[in-house]
Image (cartoon, grey):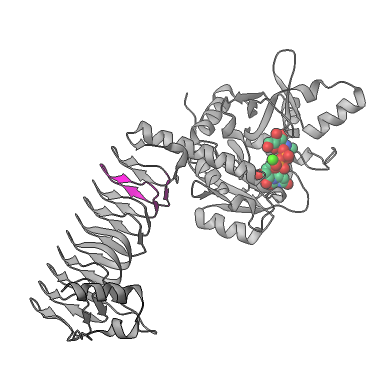
Amino acid sequence: MNSSSPAAVIVLAAGAGTRMKSSLPKVLHTIGGRSLVGHALDAAVNLNPEHLVAVVRHERERVVEHLLAHNHNLIIADQDEIPGTGRAVELGLEAIGSVSGTVVVTYGDVPLLTPETLSALVAEHQNAGNSVTVLSANVPDATGYGRIVRDENGLVTQIVEHKDALQIAEETGDSTLVDITEINSGIYAFDGEMLARSLVEVTTDNVQGEKYLTDVLGLAREAGGRVATYVTDDLMEVEGVNDRVQLATLGAELNRRIAERWMRSGVTIIDPSTTWIDVDVELAQDVTIKPNTQLHGNTTVATGSTIGPDTTLNDVEVGENATVRRTEATQAIIGPESNVGPFTYIRPGTVLGERGKIGAFYETKNVNIGRGAKLSHLGYVGDADIGENSNIGCGNITANYDGVNKHRTVIGAEVRTGSNTVFTAPVEIGDGAYTAAGAIVRKNVPPGALSMNAMDQRIIEDWVLERRAGSAAAEAAQKARDKS
Ligand code: UD1
Ligand code: CA
């Protein structure tokens, strides 16, 4: 089936989202690392529409700022005080000017709708020559949804809102409408000219006093147009977020779908239910993800690498065949064949070279670590350069902050530093230099030199026996003395 790009997609995002009970506008809540409305815009953009419009009202400034940051070509339409989806679409159309061709309407709070389903809706609409094509679904519980009403030939005649169906049942004693299980998802393809003409005629004469977009269906039929549905079996795709329970449900479902997609493309995920992967993450074939791992933002992992367990990566690039376990890392590059963790905290600006290592209980920030260099255990390195194959001893620290400014430590290649070395930045250590255990490096160390501090070790005989007389230590000391 061929179809042409729609003239416009109008994304409705004017609603208040009261049930979220949140100071954050509903459509700005995120799942999979992207806002709800961001998901809606991305699906819409995929249709390659001539115009992309978002209709806003509630928390207008905040929502618009987010929308334009997400998509700067977006047309913003402001809804006025007349409520209803029909009014929202009417103002969306006005913002474009005149429109001919297909107009698609979607919601800013329906995040799992895929570009594939939207394209299929548009294709069906155009190929069948419909005036209106409604994306519908058969659901176990239709409460709250508009019901799809068909005539004896199965053709769609109208959509009756839940509250109106209830009122009719009350007045007539006939609950036929309430019992209909085929519901309106709220996503449609329309003939644009018919839509614009019809919306002028739609009134607010209903239980909710709103201008219903669904009233366009009857007007389209009166004008001789064909109204039909495109039925989807995937109920999650048309589900909206109204509260935080639905936010979590749809977030988990999105995650399940993302994990499944990566597994099908050759990624091993030991426990998909405890693995959270944002939509923009990229994983290569033969990556292994162990349990309790979160991959966020623009994180990428190259082939052969193992991430986790218990690891969180935010905007991190991991090279091939690396191992990263029990680690939290943000805005960092972890080189190929390198080894990170366990219990490692990697902060922004850390670049670990090929075959490098950042071991247990290390914190790093803004540091370039050369190929094959190792920071094996217990320490902090910030604002530093470490050359190739240098071995940074246990407990080393860069004292990079003088209380006012940050300073750099520059360590050359093939350097060996003794345990508990403190680098008082700014300071430079030449290639192949050594530092002694406990060294405090305040002055630059030339290549090949040993840096140590003359701190004599004093022995005060019998100190414990005299000053801690009667203690367990004194007793043990006395026994040792008696033996010798
Ligand atoms: C609407 C449909 C209903 C459908 C349901 C699917 C109408 C009259 N009814 O119900 O048939 O089953 O969606 O969820 O269209 N919005 C605006 N401006 C408004 C009102 C709503 O932009 O004045 C936006 C909301 O932000 C939301 C979407 O439209 O994204 C749907 O609004 P909501 O109030 O949830 O839907 P209903 O009107 O109850
Ligand atoms: Ca709704």
- Residue pushed farthest front? 482
Which of the 4 image quadrants contains residue 360? bottom left
189, 41: nearer the viewer: 41
Which of the 4 image quadrants contains residue 448? bottom left
Side of 290 where 25 appears, left or right: right
The residue drawn where x is 17% and y is 86% is 454
* Start-end of magenta stretch: 292-315
- Residue pushed farthest left? 448
**For ligand 2, which image quadrant applies?**
top right
Q: Is residue 308 magenta?
A: yes
The residue drawn where x is 14% and y is 62% is 389
- Is residue 227 depicted above or below 372 in this figure? above
241, 128: nearer the viewer: 241
Image x and y of residue 461, in percent: 22, 85
Image x and y of residue 185, in percent: 65, 33
Which of the 4 image quadrants contains residue 177? top right
Image x and y of residue 392, in percent: 20, 67
Residue 336 appears anywhere in the view: yes
Residue 89 appears anywhere in the view: no
- Is residue 344 depicted above or below 139 in this figure? below
Image x and y of residue 427, in percent: 22, 81
Q: Is residue 79 magenta?
A: no
